[in-house]
Image: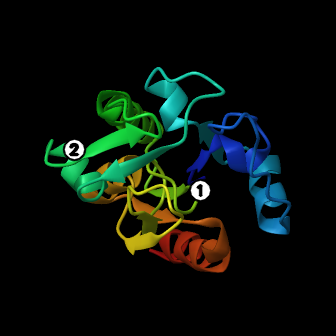
C-alpha cells in the first residue's frame, strides 16, 4: 500500500515554529491513518531546529534556490537557518526513499513545506509563487507534493497509481 509523507503538524503534533499544530480533521486523513499509510515528519525539527523557534522565511528566491545556495532562509531576527532547512529536506527525501514514497502532503505556505506559495521573505505576510525547501527537493526527485486544500487531487493521484 502506497505510503504518504505528511507534515507532522497536520496530524496535530505541536511542532510548528510557534509550538502549535495545523491539525486537519478530514475523512481521507482518518482513513489513511487507519490504513497506516501516513509517515509524519517535521523537516524543520529533523534539520535540528527547536520548538518553539523564530518564524523563518526564504529571502532572495525559493526553496530550489536555497538548495543551490542562491537564496537563504532567515528567521525574523536575521539568523541564517538555511542549513537546518536543507538538512531537514534531505531527511524527508531519505524517508521517502526508505519507504518508497512518491506522494507527500505538506503544510501550505511554509518555507519548508509550501508547494505552490511561500512568504516573500519580508515578514509582511506577502505570498509569492514558489516552493519551500523540502517541497522543492521532493519535487526535484519526482515526488508529488500536495497541500491540505488539495486532498481530493492527492486521492485521485493515489487511485491512478493503484490502477497503473
Is there a contact, CB below 8 Å, between mark 1 and mark 2?
A: no
Other residues around mark 2 within 10 Å, as few (<14) / some (14–19) / many (≥20)? many
Q: Nearer the viewer, residue 78 or 158?
A: 78
Tell me what residue is drawn at x 15 percent, y 41 percent. Answer: 69
Measured Cα–Cα span from mark 1 to mark 2: 19 Å
Give the x, y percent position of residue 128.
39, 72
Left or right, residue 75 beside residue 50: left
Q: Is residue 24 visible?
A: yes
Q: Residue 67's mark?
A: 2
Secondary structure at numbered mark 1? loop
Residue 36 drawn above or below residue 109:
above
Tell me what residue is drawn at x 34 percent, y 42 percent. Answer: 73
Secondary structure at numbered mark 2? helix
Give the x, y percent position of residue 96.
43, 42
Q: Nearer the viewer, residue 68 or 96?
A: 68
Other residues around mark 1 within 10 Å, as few (<14) / some (14–19) / many (≥20)? many
Left or right, residue 53 beside residue 128: right
Counting residues from the N terminus, which is met first, the one under dot 1 or under dot 2?
2
In which image quadrant can residue 52 be found?
top right
Tell me what residue is drawn at x 35 percent, y 68 percent. Answer: 130
Give the x, y percent position of residue 44.
49, 33
Give the x, y percent position of residue 148.
65, 66
Figure colour scheme: rainbow
Left or right, residue 136 beside residue 49: left
Left or right, residue 139 beside residue 33: left
Instruction: Say how many tags the image has.
Output: 2
Q: Residue 20's mark?
A: none
Quadrant (top left, top right, bottom left, bottom right) of the C terminus: bottom left
Q: Is residue 116 visible?
A: no
Q: Which residue is mark 1?
A: 107
Amino acid at each position: 500500500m502506497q505510503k504518504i509523507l505528511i507534515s507532522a503538524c497536520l496530524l496535530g503534533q505541536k511542532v510548528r515554529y510557534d509550538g502549535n499544530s495545523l491539525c486537519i480533521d478530514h475523512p481521507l486523513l482518518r482513513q489513511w491513518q487507519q490504513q497506516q499509510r501516513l509517515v509524519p515528519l517535521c523537516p524543520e525539527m529533523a534539520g535540528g531546529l527547536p520548538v518553539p523557534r523564530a518564524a523563518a522565511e526564504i529571502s532572495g528566491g525559493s526553496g530550489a534556490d536555497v538548495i543551490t545556495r542562491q537564496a537563504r532562509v532567515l528567521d525574523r531576527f536575521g539568523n541564517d537557518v538555511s542549513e537546518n532547512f536543507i538538512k531537514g529536506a534531505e531527511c524527508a527525501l531519505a524517508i521517502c526513499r526508505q519507504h518508497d514514497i512518491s506522494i507527500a502532503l505538506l503544510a501550505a505556505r511554509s518555507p519548508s513545506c509550501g508547494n505552490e506559495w511561500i512568504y516573500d521573505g519580508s515578514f509582511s505576510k506577502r505570498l509569492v509563487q514558489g516552493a519551500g525547501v523540502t517541497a522543492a527537493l521532493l519535487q526535484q526527485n519526482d515526488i508529488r507534493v500536495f497541500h491540505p486544500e488539495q486532498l481530493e487531487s492527492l486521492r485521485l493521484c493515489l487511485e491512478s497509481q493503484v490502477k497503473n
